[in-house]
């Protein structure tokens, strides 16, 4: 379960009894908080929510899931003091009386959902129905309908169900979550703790929350009371349109403390439509490894502000390579949308139609360039994580670079053997690091390789020293290094100390 400081972020599925088998915490995967309109007029608080609730309640359903699990409930060992003479007796007694065969039992859980059309499509959270053997949708009038899972997406924690209704449905419409403002009133309807048809109200507390639930976190935060069992239920604006899907709470105990999270409707609609049309989600892919632009990196690259996504690696054969993107480029705009925090880029790319050619703007060599890239399809095999590299052997001697607080050596056969380097490894191997020096403060480690300095390749310590002296002569206080290490290729901006 994801932890935030001393509290936990809880999925909202509510167990129905002691036989409950915990479902996986909501997944995540990618759009970032979008810029709000500069000027808007806040709506006044309504006198009551009764008319709105009466209109919306028939669209909200309870989602009940059943899973058949095998297990041996066994007999619990009584608490005995250490060294008790009865310990061996109870152990033998329990071994004789434990059931010999694994027993099957049915575990259930409860969540929420809502109708989005008159065809019987129901939207809920993926973690509500994940691993379920049976899914039942319970309507507002207590009608129970068997549901079929049309598709689900773990990365955004969204699932779509389908039922065959016996009568006319009352679906709800999606609203524009980009226009909702912090402080606006919202209404949540769901099935908290199994109490179906529960209506609560509050305000939007924040936008664009990243709670480490998945790669595409962009949650709306609300103080409307939502609890376990609210998972998958809708969050409405005062027009009765869905602007969010309730997904998680921030709580030390599992109960509501006034901090809930919902997936914005604008992030969910594309995923929902793909699940209905194809049963799965195809996401856009750019083919780059990126990192955040820090103040130091921005200063080293001549950027006015620390914004954008710094390209730390271009995947061979990917869309970015075909578009001529290079290591060290900073993507500052994608398809007409500015990239503020780095994490916005993957979400924008993921939401882009595969095969679409989009304009991008990059910062390279101190100036802005306009380019075009054809977005590819993200495959599971391309979502690679960096594998751990072997710990290097004892540090070797190298040439000390006092301005960086480290020592380096050129890559020769001896260095390849000592640091287990590939035959085509390039750059300089770091043989020692002063933990209190400029490089040590940035997490540079022994065994890492300096591949580029100031966006130019280096192969000898003298080349590195020359780059440092040139930067100092130009009055620069930081220098940008491309470092390859255990966590992969990354750019590191290091403050220049005294040579």
Image (cartoon, grey):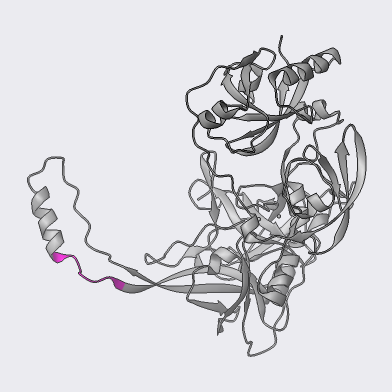
Residue drawn at x 12%, y 40% is 83
Residue 259: % across, % down: 62, 49
70 lies left or right of 166:
left
Residue drawn at x 62%, y 60% is 380
Q: Quadrant of residue 289?
A: top right
Asked if residue 22 can be seen in this view, the reply is: yes
Q: Is residue 101 above or below residue 341?
A: below
Residue drawn at x 64%, y 36% is 425
Q: Is residue 301 above or below residue 134?
A: above
223 lies left or right of 352:
left
Residue 298: % across, % down: 80, 30
426 lies left or right of 475:
left
Chain part drawn in magenta: 97-103
- Where the C terminus falls, by quadrant? top right
Q: Quadrant of residue 124?
A: bottom right
Asked if residue 39 can be seen in this view, the reply is: no
Name the foreground residue: 28 vs 20.
28
Task: State yes or no: residue 100 in magenta.
Answer: yes
Q: How many marks?
A: 0
Residue drawn at x 37%, y 67% is 19
Q: Specify the principal SS of the magenta part.
A: loop
Residue 207: % across, % down: 73, 48
Name the residue at the top extreme.
498
Task: State yes or no: residue 433 in magenta.
Answer: no
Residue 165: % across, % down: 64, 87
Name the residue at the front extreme.
413
């Amino acid at each position: 379960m994801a932890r935030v400081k001393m509290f936990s972020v809880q999925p909202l599925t509510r167990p129905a009894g002691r036989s409950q088998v915990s479902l996986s915490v909501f997944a995540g995967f990618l759009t970032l908080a979008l810029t709000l309109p500069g000027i808007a007029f806040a709506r006044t608080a309504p006198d009551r929510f009764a008319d709105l609730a009466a209109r919306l309640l028939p669209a909200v359903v309870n989602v009940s899931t059943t899973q058949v699990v095998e297990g041996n409930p066994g007999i619990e060992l009584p608490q005995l003091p250490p060294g008790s003479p009865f310990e061996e007796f109870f152990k033998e007694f329990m071994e004789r009386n434990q059931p010999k065969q694994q027993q099957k039992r049915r575990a259930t859980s409860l969540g929420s959902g809502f109708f989005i059309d008159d065809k019987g499509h129901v939207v809920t959270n993926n973690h509500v129905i994940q691993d379920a053997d049976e899914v039942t949708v319970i309507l507002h009038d207590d009608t129970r309908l068997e549901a079929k899972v049309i598709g689900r997406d773990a990365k955004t924690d969204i699932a779509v169900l389908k039922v065959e209704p016996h009568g006319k449905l009352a679906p709800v419409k999606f609203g524009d979550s980009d226009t909702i403002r912090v402080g606006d009133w919202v209404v949540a309807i769901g099935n908290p703790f199994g109490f179906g048809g529960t209506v609560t109200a509050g305000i939007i507390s924040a936008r664009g929350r990243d709670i480490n639930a998945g790669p595409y976190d962009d949650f709306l935060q609300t103080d409307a009371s939502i609890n376990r069992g609210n998972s998958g239920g809708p969050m409405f604006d005062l027009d009765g349109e869905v602007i969010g899907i309730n997904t998680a709470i921030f709580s030390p105990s599992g109960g509501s403390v006034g901090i809930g999270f919902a997936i914005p409707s604008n992030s969910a609609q594309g995923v929902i439509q793909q699940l209905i049309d194809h049963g799965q989600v195809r996401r856009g892919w750019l083919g780059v490894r990126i990192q955040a632009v820090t103040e130091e990196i921005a200063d080293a690259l001549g950027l006015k502000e620390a914004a954008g996504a710094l390209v730390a690696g271009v995947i061979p054969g990917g869309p970015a390579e075909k578009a001529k993107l290079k290591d060290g480029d900073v993507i500052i705009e994608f398809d007409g949308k500015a990239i503020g925090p780095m994490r916005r880029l993957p979400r924008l790319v993921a939401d882009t139609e595969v095969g679409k050619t989009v304009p991008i703007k990059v910062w390279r060599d101190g100036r802005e360039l306009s380019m075009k890239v054809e977005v590819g399809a993200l495959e599971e095999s391309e979502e690679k994580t960096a594998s751990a590299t072997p710990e290097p052997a004892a540090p070797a001697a190298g040439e000390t670079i006092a301005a960086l607080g480290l020592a380096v050596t050129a890559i020769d056969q001896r260095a390849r053997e000592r640091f287990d380097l590939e035959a085509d490894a390039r750059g300089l191997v770091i043989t020692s690091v002063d933990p209190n020096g400029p490089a040590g403060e940035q997490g540079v480690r022994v065994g890492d390789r300096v591949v580029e300095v100031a966006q130019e390749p280096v192969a000898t310590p003298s080349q590195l020293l020359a780059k440092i002296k040139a930067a100092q002569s130009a009055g620069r206080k930081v220098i940008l290094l491309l470092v390859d290490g255990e966590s992969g290729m990354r750019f590191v901006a290091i403050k220049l100390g005294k040579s």
